[in-house]
Amino acid sequence: MRTLACLEKTFLENLREWKILSLTLVFAPFFVFLMYAYFHAAPSSYTMLVRGGDGVAARGLINAWKSATNADGSPVFRVIEIADRAEAETRVLNRDADLLTDIPAGFSAAVEAMVRGTAATPPTLTHDGNASNPRSTVAMGFADYLAFQFAYEATGATPPIAVHAVMIGAAQQVTEFDLYVPALLVLALIMVMFTAAAALVKEVDKGTMPRLILSRLRVGELVAAVSINQVLVGTVALLLTYGAALSVGYHPQGSLAAVVAVGAVSTLSVVAIGLLTAAFLTTIFELLTVGCFPFFVLMFFSDCMVPLPKIPLFSVAGFTFNATDVLPTSVTVRAFNRILNQGAGLADVGVELAVILLLTALYFAAGAWLYRSRHMRVR
């Protein structure tokens, strides 16, 4: 009964604090639209500067670069012909272009001689890239592949090896935006840390904790009431974010039920971290300042903002536990990505779900003990 009474109390308090609740619910959907607009506006093709191009074969090579397309029909390269080498190098260094390619003056003549069977020195293409720009390396690889393909077709030569590419996973093309959707869904869950911690801190801040202690409310009952409310909030935020992704053309491979199931468990893990945070705080002001630290740790080290290098610690049942996986939200990103972009079912992410549950239990145990010791002990 005490749990139900506390549940009603915290639920009504969530509704009264509608500004915080609204921010929690719309934060991640806003980022979905923002990231979609960014990826939609940002060029997906590689900017390639080309110097030289005299002769039929050279023009054919340039046209091969221009006509190359990705699986979704977008061009691989945005080819810009340029004469001034100094200007081209400056643009590559400033990342206004990804690659500079020099076609030698005798390129067309050498290709024509090879077609006639006349001995000729193979022409050499020169690539200039920016060592600090990873796109330069990728653009160089694409450019070389297309150049070799053009040369074999133009001269009728037989390639020394045959290469057959097979795409593993779902047949549907996965865009860069699609790869960000799982992380954005987890971002919706991470926002629950503030509302969960606030529900616990304000009892101390407003001086209502002595009344709760006198009512013989146990820390487990308080945490259970807060957890149920926050799982509801997290699930609604998750569904709103999922709906926002669908509205801009996202096509998930897996089921919504699996996403909600993993999301509900992951919300509990965020509540546990919120409980652990609240144990060290006594005012809402402290939550808005000091509490930002664990929030940003969750956001940055869960692969929600930028992909991080993997530091494997150990492997169990085919699951590699990385250093960042001490945060359950990091494991959630991996589970969501498998479900949404690889078509995995709930049974396929069973190991990830078990890891999230184990971490949640550990964080809840530590948080409940600390919160009771610091705020719910009779003095």
Image: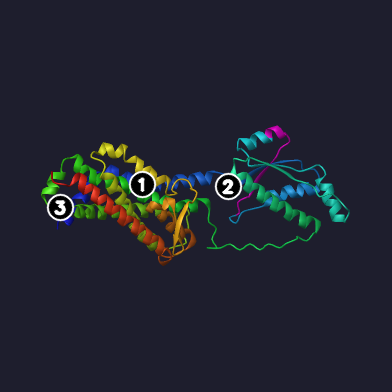
Front one among 114 and 296: 296
Q: Earlier in the sequence, mark 3 or mark 2?
A: 2
| Alpha carbon distance from label 3 to label 1 | 33 Å
Labels 3 & 1 near each other (Cβ < 8 A): no
Q: Quick check: is 80 in the magenta stretch?
A: yes
Residue 247 seen in the current view: no
SS class of the residue under badge 1?
Answer: helix
Q: Earlier in the sequence, mark 3 or mark 1?
A: 1
Residue, disc 3: 217
Region rendered in magenta:
73-87
Q: Nearer the viewer, mark 3 or mark 2?
A: 3
Residue 363 rendering spot, x and y as whole percentages: 31, 52
The answer to whether 77 appears left or right of 345 in the picture is right
Q: Which mark is residue 44?
A: 2
Figure disc tally = 3
Q: Nearer the viewer, mark 3 or mark 1?
A: 3
Residue, disc 1: 26
Q: Which mark is residue 103?
A: none
Residue type indicated by callout 1: Val
The answer to whether 104 appears left or right of 45 in the picture is right
Bin the neighbour count of mark 3 within 10 Å (Cα to Cα): few under 14, some 14-19, many 20 and up.
some
Residue type indicated by callout 2: Ser
Residue at the image point whose x is 53% and y is 44% from the top = 41
Q: Quick check: is 303 in the magenta stretch?
A: no
The answer to whether 80 appears left or right of 24 in the picture is right
Residue at the image point whose x is 62% and y is 48% from the top = 138
